[in-house]
Image: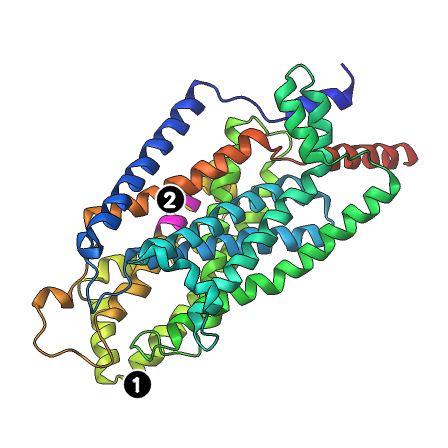
């Protein structure tokens, strides 16, 4: 077997082993539980949730913000790395693109889940109010999803052509890959068009990602609510998205590396670079958190004082300090040490960052809703408190499981490390070594 064939065999998608089948089955069960809970929510209405006139946005919108943040880094990182043309980035970009597609798809689903009347979804496109940030959110998510899919698909075309031949003993798979390869032959003209297309999409994704996060922040900051009424919210959301997305990316890369045995291609060097990037992101986000909370604390208006009291010392204090301490301060300290930037320690830290990032979105959304700009008189006491119902947790868990399931399916059928580019880079390296 030639070196080329060995590399293709190592990088070609592999069938699930027993552990993989169990993993897919577990994710499918959790997703199904969420679907059943959502069907019951449609049948009975939002009364099965704990959403009320105060807490109009709850865990569903928190989940939406988390998915948007995760998709931001997936596409943004992939675009920057593709434009950089650095060889070390080759094993990382495709995993980032998979995360971006799965997360932004679930962000769209999260909006639908929050709607009491999902049958009115077409009206968002047919009769948009362009003065509303919500309309812009729908528009940018749709465009962003389309570009994310293209960013994942187009670079894969040469690999699909390789897999068409590799799976010639499996006619169905060969036909599918052949269809996806769209008659790729590797001619000079095709390569030129292919490279230009990737560059155009990667350049387009950078402003799209920034607009997506900014519009998401404006959706909150234009409501005049305590805790959201800030011009700082745009960069605050973007810096927070960097932390959440990098954490999710590290987690996905570690899992793919371990279970696909790609240690030869995804090395400790990649984790070291990602660890440094995560430290930078955590410190930037920590600065914006200080700006977001210290300035209102200094002004100390009545509404802001009550809001900060709940976050710092009240019912949300445990979540708040867990998110700040466990998700920003602790990772920043630990990752300063080289030993902690090894794959397994990075994996543990990344999981902590992802969990705390999700809770950070929850405490951005929920507490502010309990301090309405115009309080309603004589409302039930329970309206001033919010914690998700069982239906909300099942549906939210279902979306998280479905996102991971989509990434898992991508990994099963798409090469996570680009085959053609890896082969090209190895040939370039060989030529350079020969010259030396």
Residue 112 visible within the image: yes
> In the drawing, what numbered circle is on residue 299?
1
Could you tell me residue 58's position as x and y percent? Answer: 27, 60
The residue furthest right is 435
Q: Is residue 348 left or right of residue 159?
A: left
Where are the magenta residues, as a range? Answer: 350-355
How many residues crowd around disc 2 within 10 Å: few (fewer than 14), some, or many (20 or more)? many
Give the labeled residue for mark 2.
400
As drawn, the label of residue 261 is none
Q: Indicate which label's residue lies in the foreground, 1 or 2.
A: 2
Q: Percent position (x, y) of residue 220?
A: 38, 71
Q: In the rendered view, does 81 fall on the left or right side of 354?
A: right
Name the residue rendered at 23%, 48% in the picture.
43
Depth check: 54 or 286 in front?
54
What residue sits 78% from the left and 35% below the top? 184
- Residue 308 in percent (x, y) is at 25, 73
Q: Nearer the viewer, residue 410 or 185?
A: 185
- Quadrant housing residue 191: top right
* For residue 346, above or below residue 384: above
- Residue at position x 68%, y 55% in the image: 201
Q: Label 1, label 2: how many angstroms apart (C-alpha)?
A: 38 Å
Q: Secondary structure at mark 1?
A: helix
The stretch drawn in magenta includes residue 301: no
Question: Residue at coordinates 65% horizontally, 18% vertically from top-left?
Answer: 171
Q: Secondary structure at mark 2?
A: helix
């Amino acid at each position: 077997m030639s070196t080329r064939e060995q590399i293709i065999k190592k990088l070609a998608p592999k069938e699930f082993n027993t552990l993989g089948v169990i993993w897919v089955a577990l994710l499918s069960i959790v997703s199904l539980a969420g679907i059943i809970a959502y069907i019951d929510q449609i049948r009975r209405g939002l009364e099965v949730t704990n959403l009320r006139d105060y807490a109009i946005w709850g865990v569903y919108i928190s989940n939406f913000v988390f998915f948007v943040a995760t998709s931001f880094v997936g596409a943004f990182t992939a675009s920057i790395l593709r434009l950089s043309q650095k060889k070390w980035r080759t094993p990382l970009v495709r995993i980032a693109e998979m995360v971006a597609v799965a997360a932004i798809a679930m962000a769209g689903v999260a909006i639908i889940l929050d709607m009491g009347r999902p049958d009115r979804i077409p009206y968002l496109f047919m009769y948009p109010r362009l003065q509303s940030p919500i309309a812009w959110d729908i528009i940018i998510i749709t465009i962003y999803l389309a570009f994310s899919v293209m960013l994942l698909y187009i670079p894969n075309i040469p690999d699909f052509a390789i897999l068409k031949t590799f799976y010639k003993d499996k006619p169905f798979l060969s036909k599918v890959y052949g269809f996806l390869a769209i008659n790729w032959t590797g001619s000079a003209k095709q390569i030129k068009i292919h490279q230009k297309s990737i560059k155009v999409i990667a350049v387009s994704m950078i402003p799209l990602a920034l607009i997506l996060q900014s519009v998401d922040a404006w959706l909150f900051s234009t409501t005049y609510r305590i805790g959201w009424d800030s011009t700082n919210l745009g960069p605050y959301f973007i810096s927070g998205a960097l932390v959440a997305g990098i954490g999710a990316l590290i987690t996905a890369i570690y899992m793919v590396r371990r279970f696909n045995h790609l240690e030869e291609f995804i090395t400790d060097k990649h984790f070291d670079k990602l660890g440094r990037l995560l430290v930078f992101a955590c410190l930037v986000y920590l600065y914006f958190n200080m700006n977001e909370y210290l300035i209102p604390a200094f002004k100390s208006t009545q509404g802001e004082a009550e809001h900060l009291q709940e976050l710092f010392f009240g019912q949300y204090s445990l979540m708040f300090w867990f998110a700040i301490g466990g998700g920003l301060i602790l990772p920043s300290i630990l990752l300063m040490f080289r030993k902690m930037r090894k794959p397994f320690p990075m994996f543990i830290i990344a999981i902590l960052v992802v969990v705390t990032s999700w809770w950070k979105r929850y405490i951005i959304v929920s507490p502010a809703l309990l301090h309405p700009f115009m309080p309603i008189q004589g409302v039930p006491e329970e309206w001033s408190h919010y914690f998700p119902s069982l239906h909300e947790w099942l549906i939210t868990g279902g979306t998280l499981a479905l996102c991971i399931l989509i990434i898992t399916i991508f990994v099963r059928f798409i090469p996570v490390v680009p085959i053609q580019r890896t082969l090209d880079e190895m040939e370039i390296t060989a030529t350079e070594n020969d010259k030396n």
